[in-house]
Image: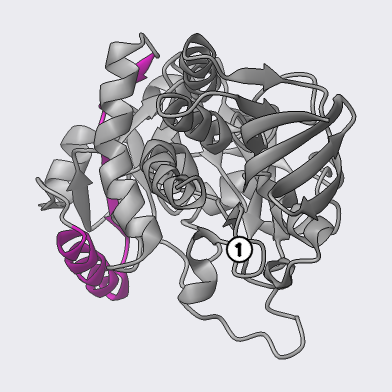
Amino acid sequence: MDRANIVIIGGGVVGCAVARAVSSRWSDVFLLEALPKLAMGASSRNSGVIHSGLYYAPGSLKAKHCVRGNRLTYEFCAAHNVPHHNIGKIVVATSDVEVAQLMALLEVGKKNGLEGLRVIDRAAIQTREPHISGIQAIEVPSTGILASEELVKAYARVASDQGAHIVTNARVERLEPSSDGIRVFSSAGEIEAACVINSAGLFADEVAAMLGSKMAEHRIYPVRGEYCEFVREKQDWIRGLVYPLPHTDGVSLGAHLTKTLWGSVLVGPTARYIDDKNDYERNRESTEYFAEHARVLVPGLQASDLRLAYSGIRAKLIPPPTSAGNSFTKSAADFIIQRDPEFLRVVQLIGIESPGLTSAPAIAEHVSELVKEVLA
């Protein structure tokens, strides 16, 4: 059986960022991706937003890695010609009740170390976004947009240049602990690794279960997020990034408006729990549904101004509200990044959802330090 220092399971943005980080320090690095191409899942089916770290609980991994990842992502994009734009965003309150929530959100952002945040009034909102209705808003200057698939490819390209082996059509089928490593059986062959990194996204809990790890108890609940986009004639209605107040259930930041690099305007994503981790299209919401929810911010919007776009699926650790005994906790909403307490040669990344795209290079630094412990 072939041997490797490190095997990474999963070729999304985090897996490829990790491959780039660890291949700069160690040789014999393999990344195994189940699908024919990298980034065919959540890593390319998202809003393409470089998040600021505004929303996440102070002290959480999401807050820490998003804030650092924001800076690292801009630096990487600039250095490797990944299309991006530091466009900024506004988070809009549309009622007096929401103004109080907006102020609370502002304090979270300050605690997380965000710079340049400021509150603007109705007139300033109208100057920035003439078609948006709101009482007050927070301006967030560090938010931006990028070409997400190009980002993943760039991470993988750097990793390959550093000697990492990127293998697609390599679905992991079995994992077996050995005396000095982990045996990885995949559709592309078999290999024994001194360290395995589980970065399988939606399927990270299933990979953990292959080991018989108790960390498989961190079940992933797939949540589909659907998008619409403005028809061409209405694309000039939105100039940048416009967000509502986030939902309090920990599941969604709310359907926002995203001006993309190529000039279109996305509305979404929605948040619906589904049973099938591959169900991107069944029972899609109508354009009227999107228009109804978006009218809170864009009063003049009609269903005829929209057309259906793509959808993505988030790897949530929060069970549906209807689940027996479900109680939402902040810890359930955070990233899980740690060495497996039973299988010390395995680094587990579970529940890596938004802001995973932005956080990827900071997560990769974290993982690299855990790998250093394994390979010491």
Q: Amino acid at mark 1?
A: Asp
Q: Residue at x 24, y 35 (%)?
A: 71
Name the residue at 21% across, 45% down: 140
User: Relative to residue 369, is residue 182 drawn left or right?
Assistant: right
Task: Please state the total of marks drawn on the protein image.
Answer: 1
Q: Is residue 104 magenta?
A: yes
Q: Residue furthest bottom?
A: 325
The quadrant of the image that shows the N terminus is top right
- Whether residue 161 sits left or right of residue 317 in the image: it is left
Query: Residue 282: x percent and y percent?
Result: 87, 44
The residue pinned by badge 1 equals 340
Q: Nearer the viewer, residue 240 or 17?
A: 17
x, y percent for residue 188 = 86, 24
Tell me residue 269's x, y (percent): 58, 45
Task: Give the magenta-colored segment's residue range.
Answer: 83-112
Residue at the image position 68 percent from the left and 49 percent from the top: 180
Q: Position of residue 293 (x, y in %)?
A: 55, 53
Position above or below: 255 against 318 = above
- Rendered view: 119 above or below 356: below
The crowding category of the residue bearing disc 1, from other C-alpha atoms within 10 Å (few below 14, some 14 to 19, many at least 20), is: some
Element type where label 1 sits in the image: loop
